[in-house]
Image: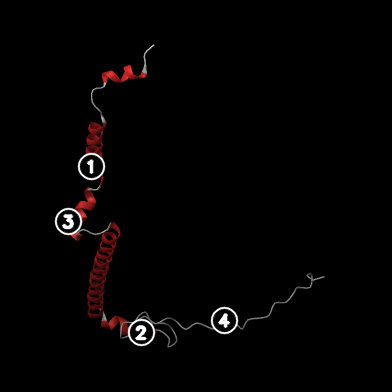
Amino acid sequence: MKKPDMLLTDIERSIFAKALVISIIAHTALLGGTSFSLFADWWTYGVHSPSYINAQKSKENKEAEAARRKAAAEEKAAEEAKKAKTEKAAAPAATNAANAATPANAATPAAEDGKVTPPEVDPLPPKKEFQLGDDLSLD
C-alpha cells in the first residue's frame, strides 16, 4: 500500500502555470475567432458597444431602403407619364368621341387632368331596427 506522500514524489513541478498559459491562449483564440465581425465593425464605426453599432446599421439600412423606394417611385411615375403622353398624343379623336357617347352621370376613366373619377353610387337604404319574426319569441 502506498502512502499519499509517495504519490506526489513523481511530480516535480506544478502544472498550474502551464494550465494557466494554455487557458489564456485558448480563451483568446475563442473570443478573437468569434468576435471577428465585432472587430470589423469597430474598424468602420469606431469602438462602441454592439447595440450602438446595430442602431447605426439599422439607421443606414432604413435610409438606403427609403432612397431605393423613392428612386423606384420616381422611375415608375416617369414611365407612367411617358405612357400617358404617348396615349394622349396617339388617339385624341377617339377619346373625344368616346366621351361624347357616354351619358353625363357615367364615370369617365380619366378626366382632363388625369384623375380617375368613380361612378356615382346610389346611397344605401336607411338602417332598420331589429324585429323578431312571427315564429320567434323571447319567452
| Quarter-of-image position of residue 130 | bottom right
Are the residues tagged 4 and 3 within 8 Å (C-beta)?
no
Residue 30 sits in which quadrant?
top left
Label 3 crowding class (10 Å Cα cut-off): few <14, some 14-19, many 20+? few
Residue corresponding to mark 4:
124
Please report whichever mark, 2 or 1, sits nearer to the chain's N-terminal start. Answer: 1
Q: Specify which label sits upstream in the sequence, 1 or 3.
A: 1
Callout 1–callout 3 Cβ contact below 8 Å:
no
x, y percent for residue 72: 25, 68
As measured in the structure, the alpha-carbon distance from the residue carrying label 2 to the one carrying label 1 is 80 Å
Q: Are marks 4 and 2 in contact (CB under 8 Å)?
A: no
**Separation (CA) of disc 3 from disc 2:** 66 Å
Residue type beneath disc 1: Thr
Q: Residues within 10 Å of mark 2 (few under 14, many from 20)?
A: some
Q: Secondary structure at mark 2?
A: helix
Q: Nearer the viewer, residue 93 or 71?
A: 71
Q: Which of the marked residues, 4 or 3, is nearer the chain's N terminus?
A: 3
The residue under label 2 is 99
Mark with earlier residue (4, 2) = 2
Q: Say what amino acid the circle numbered 3 marks.
A: Trp
**Residue pointed to by mark 1:** 28
Q: Report crowding for label 4: few under 14, some 14 to 19, many 20 or more residues within 10 A (C-alpha).
A: few
Screen quadrant of the C terminus: bottom right
Q: How is the image coloured?
A: secondary structure
The alpha-carbon separation of the residues under discs 4 and 2 comes to: 29 Å
Q: Give the crowd class for mark 1: few <14, some 14-19, many >=20 residues within 10 Å.
A: few
